[in-house]
Amino acid sequence: MLMIRTASFLRVALFLLVLLMLPAGSLYAQKKKQFTVVLDAGHGGNDPGAVHGKVKEKDINLTVTKMLAEKIKKKYPEVKVVFTRSTDVFVTLEGRSNKANKEKADLFISIHVNSAKKRSADGVETFMWGIPSTEDEKRLAMYENQVVELEKDKGAKYKKFDSDEDFILKQLMFDQDVTLSAEIAQLVQKALVKSTKRTDRGVKSGDLYVLRNSAMPRILIEMPFLSNAGDRQFLTSAAGQKKIVEGIFEGFSKYYELYGKNNDDNAGGASVDDSVEVDEENVKSGVPLFKVQLFAADTKLKSNDKRFKGLKTDSFKEGKWYKYTYGSTEDYDKAVKMKKEVSAKFKDAFVIAFIDGKRVETSKAVEIYKKNKKKK
Ligand SMILES: [Zn+2]
C-alpha cells in the first residue's frame, strides 16, 4: 500500500513539476483558442451619431458597451473581451472590422442607438449583414453607413459595391457565419425585448459596412430610439441602460453556452463546430439534408402548439435548446423555397443542414450539395 501511494505521489509530483516548467497557457493553447468577443461601441470622436439636445448616441453606446464588458468578464472570466474603442475617439468602420479580424474574434457585437425622422418609430432591433428587403432596413443601413463621409476617402472603398447586389449575394454564399449570426441575432433580440419590454422590431438584414468585412458571426444591435420620447426616457435612464445590458448579456450568454463554452468536452450538447470537425470524413460521403429552422425554445413543445402556427414541425436538441424545424429535403434550392414559404409566418426562419444526422454549417453543406449536383 505504502509503496503504491509513494509511487503515485511521485507521479503527481512529477506531473506538477512538468506543469510548472511549461510556459503559461501552452497547455490549452493548442487545444482551443480563447473565446474572443469584440464589442464595438458605435460612433465616437467627431462623429456623435444620433443627437438630441445634449444627449449623444456615441456616449450611450460607450457606456452600455463598457457595462456589458464588465458583466461578461465577471460571469465568464475565461472570455477575452476586446473593444474597438474604449474612449471618445473616431474609428473608421473598416478599422473596427479589421480589429475583429486581427483578433480572430469568435463574435462581433456592434452597439448603436436608433433614430428616425418619424418620431413615432420606437423599439429595439438586431441586424445581420445581408440584403435589405424593406425600406426600413435600407434606411437603417444608410443611416449607420453615412459616417464614412467623415473618413479620409469619403467612403470610396465601401461604395464601389453599393450598386452591386450581386456582390452581397456572392459573399453570402461563402459566408460561413450566416447561420451563427442568425442565432446570436435571434437570441439577443429575444432577450432584449424581454428585459426592456420595448417594441419588438425583430431581426433584420442590411448592408452595414461595419459588418461587411468581419469574418465571424456578427450583429449590430439598435437600442431604443433617441428620436422617440418614451424610448429616449428609457434609453437615457440608468435603470433603462441596465435593462438593455441585461438583455444583450442574456443573449450573449445563451450563445456562448451553446457555441463557445467548452466545445471540446461538451459531449452532450453538440456544437456546430464539433459536428463539422468530428464529421469531416463523413462529410465527403454523406448527403446533406436541409431543413428550415423556425425558432428555438428551452422547452419541449407539443406538436399542436400554437407557436407552430399550424405548420407540421420536427425538432432536434442542441445543448439545452429544442430547435424546431420545418420540412426536409436534399435539394438546397427547394429548402430556400421552403424558407420563403414560411417566412410570412416566421420572419426569422433560416435554412440549416445536417449530414448523417449531425448538424453542420449550412454553407459547407451547400458546397457539398453543389459538388454532388455537378457530378450528376
Ligand atoms: Zn449608430
Image (cartoon, grey):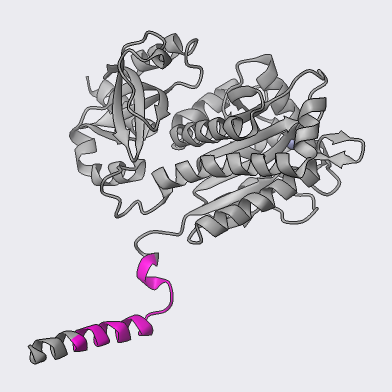
Q: Is residue 65 above or below residue 77?
A: above
Left or right side of 314 for 158: right
Residue 80 can be seen in this image: no
Picture residue at 44% right of the left edge, 37% below the top: 176
- In magenta, the rendered stretch is 9-28
Which x, y percent locates residue 356?
A: 20, 32
Left or right side of 316 for 73: right
Residue 242 can be seen in this image: yes
Which x, y percent locates residue 37?
A: 55, 51
Quadrant containing ligand 1 reads top right
Which x, y percent locates residue 286?
A: 20, 31
Specify the principal SS of the magenta part: helix
Picture residue at 82% right of the left edge, 34% below the top: 50
Where residue 319 sits, quadrant-wise, is: top left
Picture residue at 76% right of the left edge, 36% below the top: 235
Quadrant where the image shows the N terminus: bottom left
